[in-house]
Amino acid sequence: MKSKLLFSAAIAGLFSFGAANAQCTQPIVEIPYFMGFEDTDDIDCLTYEDVNGGIESGWMIENEFFPTQTGDASMIYVYDLDLPGDDWFFTPGLNLVGGVSYNLDFLYRSGLGSAFLLENMEVKLGNEASSTAMTTTLFTAENIDTDFGSDFTPASITFTPPLSGTYYIGFHSYSEADQGYIQIDDLMVTSALAVDSFNKELLSYNNPVKDLLEISYPGAISEVSLYNLLGQQVLQASNASQVDTSHLTSGTYVAKITADGATATVKVVKH
């Protein structure tokens, strides 16, 4: 247990928890939205709220100690020795259309689960980036007992905002005191229109991409669109299973692939 406590203190000392700085380039984004928590992502548009006032606990972006599935960084919740978790991080504002369904996808797991340390987390939707504005529960996971040697657990939630406007998604830790960690990665919000009929298991593509994005799917691919992490379309190709991305800068993109009237959205890393 001693090594666990020292590790927590060392991690907490490296990072500060609080509001994002003034360098946020796009406080309100269009859909699709992707956040991999990498340096190339718009991480300054994420905001934080420390409700419990714990000095050691909180959410942070970490790119050194914890293994990830893609890239080097992820979002980590660090426990407090004495206080139960009551800490949030929020997406930037998402421009959503009322009555339209959206998919929220992300990966999660906990740390030190093998030591019988359990984590609790919920994900909510609201009209402001604050805990009091988070009125709609999208997802709850209690007694998470995985560790950093376990595979990530994928979460996929479909939700429909009642009215058009700006919405925020908040991730909330409410674990007991002196537990372990929570890790979040590859967060994505996409339109749910026509996604269900697209068989992603039959879709294959090269990732990362150097110049040519090559897509294989049994159905005829009618359109491929690439979006940057601000939700801006940067490329569109029709009737193409091969897409030239050589003119794009290195970074993470969201690819929207349409085939046989159905649509799938995936993350693509351009080298």
Image (tube, rainbow, N blue to C red):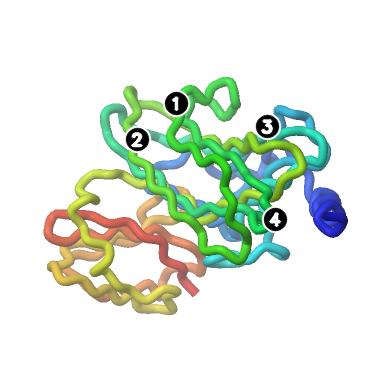
78 horizontally vs 32: left or right: right
The answer to whether one can see residue 27 in this image is: no
**Amino acid type assigned to the residue bearing label 4 in the image:** Ala
Could you tell me residue 249's position as x and y percent? Answer: 49, 68
- Name the N-terminal-most of marks 4 and 3: 3
Tags 1 and 2 in contact by the CB under 8 Å rule?
Answer: yes
Question: Which residue is rendered at x = 59% and y = 51% of the image?
Answer: 145
Going from N to C along the chain, the mark reached first, 4 or 1, is 4
Whole-angstrom CA distance, mark 3 to mark 2, is 24 Å
Classify residue 18 by image quadrant.
Answer: top right
| Label whose residue precedes the other's in the sequence (1 or 2) | 1
Q: Are marks 3 and 2 in contact (CB under 8 Å)?
A: no
The residue pinned by badge 3 equals: 86
Specify the quadrant that holds the N terminus.
bottom right
Dot 2 amino acid type: Phe
Q: Secondary structure at mark 2?
A: strand
Upstream in the sequence, badge 1 or badge 3? 3
**SS for dot 4:** helix
Question: In whole angstroms, how far apart are the C-alphas of marks 1 and 3?
Answer: 17 Å
Q: Residue at 37% across / 72% down in the picture?
A: 245
Query: Pointer 1 and pointer 3: residues touching (CB < 8 Å)?
Result: no
Say what amino acid the circle numbered 3 marks.
Answer: Asp
Residue 112 rendering spot, x and y as whole percentages = 68, 56
Which residue lies under the disc numbered 4? Answer: 115
Amino acid type shown at disc 1: Thr
State the SS at label 3.
loop
Residue 120 visible, this orientation: yes
Residue behind mark 1: 136
Place residue 55 in its image quadrant. Answer: top right
Q: Which residue is mark 2?
A: 159
Q: Position of residue 125 (x, y in %)?
A: 46, 30
Q: CA distance from mark 2 to mark 4?
A: 35 Å
